Structures are given as structure tokens and as C-alpha cells.
Image (cartoon, rainbow, N blue to C red):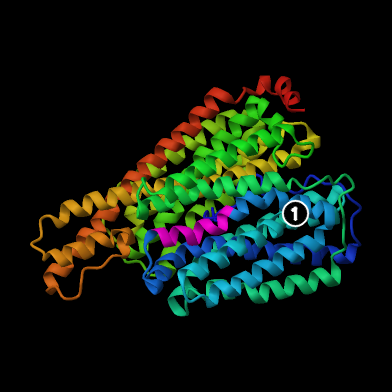
Amino acid sequence: MASIIPMRTPCDAVAQSAVGEIPCEERAKPWVLTATILASSMAFIDSTAINIALPSLQANFHANVVDVQWVVESYGLFLGALILVGGSLGDLFGRRLIFMAGVAVFTIASVACGVAQSIPVLIAARSVQGVGAALLVPGSLAIISTSFDEKSRGQAIGVWSGFTAITTAVGPVLGGWLVEHASWRWVFFINVPLAAAVIVISLWRIPETIGKAAGRIDWPGALLATLGLGGIVFGFIESSNLGWRNPLVFGSLILGLGCLTGFAALEARTSFPMVPLVLFKNPSFSGANLLTLFLYSAVGIFFFLFPLNLIQVQQYSSTAAGAAILPFILLMFLLSRWSGGLVARYGARRPLIVGPLVAALGFVLFAVPAIARDYWVMFFPAVVVLGLGMAITVAPLTTDVMNSVDQDVVGTASGINNAVARVAGILAIAILGIAMVYAFRARLDRALDHFSLPSGVLGELRSNESQLAGLQAPANLDQKTQEEINNSIRLAFVFGFRLVMLICSGLALASAAVAWLMLPKASNRSSLSGQAS
């Protein structure tokens, strides 16, 4: 996510690269790579570091889990809903122009996030940041694709992928170090010097390009998609605070479903759809996106809850919590070429069955630890197994999406899959976050019944249960009672975390089942690839 996810989504390296334009001058090419790598690093570092900063941010604002969810969801919502529009805007008005606009909006919003003095202001700034990212993210690879000729384009994208993988790995550790030694606000301020360098290089060295076949922007589709996702997310997240019977909750859910239904109807009729529904007639393309929805939902909620577990329950420092995720990201990076070779040897279907099965085992292993600070015994094996499962999956998934459609729509298809991965994380945090809150409350309420607490203290604890592990026993209790209550709070979080990890394992198994049932065998691939045209 981010994303809410500390890893690049499937099709990141191809979603905006299926473009053919006149390459730029030879002397400008290194600067093009420098600018696009720095810009992408802004988005990737931000999405990985914010998860590590959440516990500190929650304590700073005395926020509950709903507030923390919105800090993540507001960014992902606008990025997921508008990323396809961002690519189209670049084709229509100029890729460098929209790219720089995205960098500027992202940076201004980052500064607003860093100086925010309240949760509502931070959430609003994160929303604007998501809009900036929706302009910035599609632009990076589109600029690379138009600046390099066909012979050197693959190598350029490889350099971009390598450097952005490194920055993705650095993000959690850097974010943790900044939180521990400076402030969570520096997670956002660090974007400013990077953005300044990107804009200067872009104005100095990157040529402007406009798509020759650019069509109209599907603004009605973008509006319906944003309102639809926003209504669904609002309804699920706020149900924890307001209850299901609140008019705002069921009203927003009805509005969201209505807008998404209208979005599907509109996309079927419009001449320039944001999401061409005809692509989903291909069972391989539909299966790949359904697999993405299930698997990236599991990954999205995992990377939301895992840092909270490490920092608030296991008492890790922010830096240590960031480093704990490194094996996952390094495995993704180191095994990407190997997993790509699996497709040539076995086809995409087998790795897309095996990979999610391995990931499912990883999620089960995360459901084992209770409160134990021994990372190498309790968490490291789970991180490695999950990382291996995702490493087996991502490259074949990208390949399957590419091979399931005709080459003239490969950019659109990969962009859709990228958006599906981001939306999956958004929905998972909203929906599975409810499961986490309810499980935490049920377990903690049972534990509190065993304490002889004054009614006022008991009411205070129960009214603040939405803080999850950020909840602390009242200071007016004796030391022993405080310690016992705080331990009960941590155990209640572990109970909810285990439940969610088992649900994630089920989602990963569902992904493997989708690959088994919907993806064609290699021998059937050629006969299906033309159906999406």
C-alpha cells in the first residue's frame, strides 16, 4: 500500500510505459532518470514511512484508530481513484507539465501535513497529497518511455526499478529513524528538498511531450469513482464510532454503492472510458484483477496493523520497527528477476497458485506470536515466508495482465491492475479494520470484567477502546493495576491481530483459488489473448 503498502504495486513498471515517442537528446537522459527516480522516491518513501509514524502520530494527537485510518485512507482514496486520470492528463496537456504539477501539489501538501496541528487538518492535507501523487506517479515512467528509444528503454526502466526498490527499502528505516530522533513531521518535510531538485531538473533538462492519440478525460467517471469509493470507505470506517444505524453510516454506504453502480454503467457507454469494461470479458484479465483484489487486501491491512503491533505492543523502537520489514522488501527486490523467469518456464498460472499459498502460510505464522520481543524467533520467519510468497507472485501477476490483452491496450490494462491493487488496500483497512476493533473490544471487555474498577474508570476505558493498543490505563490507579490493565490491552490487540492475520490467510488462499479456476494454462493463452480487443 499507501499506498498504505511498503512495496510497489503490480504493473508499476509498465502501467505508464507503453508509449512510443521521439526520444530526447542523449545528454538529457541521465537527468531524466535522476528526476523521475527522485520523484518516485518521494511517493514510495512517503507511503512506507507513514506506517511507521502512525503510533507516534496517534500519541501526539491522542487519536483513535478511526483517525489513524483516515490518515492512511484519505491519501490512498484519491490516489487510487484518480491515478488513471493522471496518466490521461499527461497525455493530453503534456507529461512534463502534469508531472511537475503533481510534484508541486504533493510537496505543498507534504508541508501542510508536517505543520498540521490537528487530525482534521492532517487528513485534509493527506487528501491533497493523494491528488498530487495521482498526477506524479503515472508521469515518471511515461516520461522515461518517451525520452528513451525502444532499444534503451528497457535498460532505463531497469535502472529506475532498481533505484526505486532501494528507496522503498530505505523508507521504513528512514521513517523510523526520523520519528525516533526528530519527529513524525519530518517524514513529510523530507519531501521538500527532493521536490526542489526534481522541478529544477525537469525545467532544465526534460523535454515536453504530448500523446498523439490522447482522447478526452473521463471526468464523470473519475467523479463517480471517487464518490463511490469515498462513500464505502466512510461508511465502514465511521461505523466503529457512530454505529451501523447512524444515518451518516448507512447513507454513505448507499451513496457509495449507487455511485459505483453508476460508474459501471457510465464506463459501458462512454466513448473514452477510464476503465474499459470490455477488458474484463477476458477471463485471464478478470482473474488476475480478482487475484490482485484479494491478495493486496491482505497485504494492505497487514502493513497497517503490523507497525502498530511492533511499536505499541511489542515495544520496538520506531527504527527497529522499520528495519523489521526490510527482509520482506529485500526479498521482493532480490528475487524479482528469478520470479520473472518462472513465467518463461512454467507460465504465469503455476506461480500465481504457489505464491499466494506461500503468502497464506506467512500470514498464519504472523498469527502465532503473542507478546515476545524476540524478533528473530517470532517474526523474522513470518516476514521471510510472506516476502517469498509475494516475490513469487508479483512478476508473474504483471506478466499475466500484460499477456491477457492486446498490445494496443496494454498501458490501460496495467493501469487498471495498478489501481485495483491500491483500492484493495483502501477497502481492506476500512473493512478489516472493523474486525480488528470489534475483536479488540470483545477481548478487552472480558478482561476488564475481572478487575474491581470504579464505574467511572471502567466507562473511561471502554469509551476509548477505539484507540486500540494506544489506550493506557488511567494514571490514578495503583501501579500494579495499571500494569495489569495495560497488559490486558496489549493482549486484546494481539487477539485482534491474530484474527485479522487468519482472515488475510484466507484472502491469500482465495487468490490461489482464483488463479487455479480462472487463469488459463499456458497452452490456452494464445487463444484467449485476443478476446479483450
Most extreme residue toward the bottom is 182
Q: Main secondary structure of the magenta part?
A: helix
Query: How far across and down, in percent of the image, does residue 330 sit?
Result: 54, 55
Query: How far across and down, in percent of the image, does residue 306 sit?
Result: 40, 56
The image shows residue 424, relative to residue 142, as above or below, that is above
The image shows residue 527, relative to residue 45, as above or below, that is above
Magenta extent: 66-77
Q: Quadrant of residue 64?
A: bottom left
Q: Is residue 349 left or right of residue 18?
A: left
The image shows residue 10, relative to residue 72, as above or below, that is above
The amino acid on which the numbered mark 1 sits, given as a three-letter code, is Leu
Q: Quadrant of residue 108?
A: bottom right
Q: Residue at x 38, y 70 (%)?
A: 317
Which one is in front, 419 or 160? 419
Would residue 69 be counted in the magenta stretch? yes
Which one is in front, 242 or 354? 242
Most extreme residue toward the left is 452
Which residue lies under the disc numbered 1?
Answer: 141
Q: Quadrant of residue 287?
A: top right
Q: Secondary structure at mark 1?
A: helix
Most extreme residue toward the front is 247
Query: How far across and down, in percent of the image, does residue 32 sit?
Result: 80, 63
Q: Is residue 1 left or right of residue 495?
A: right
Query: How far across and down, in percent of the image, does residue 490 sit?
Result: 26, 59
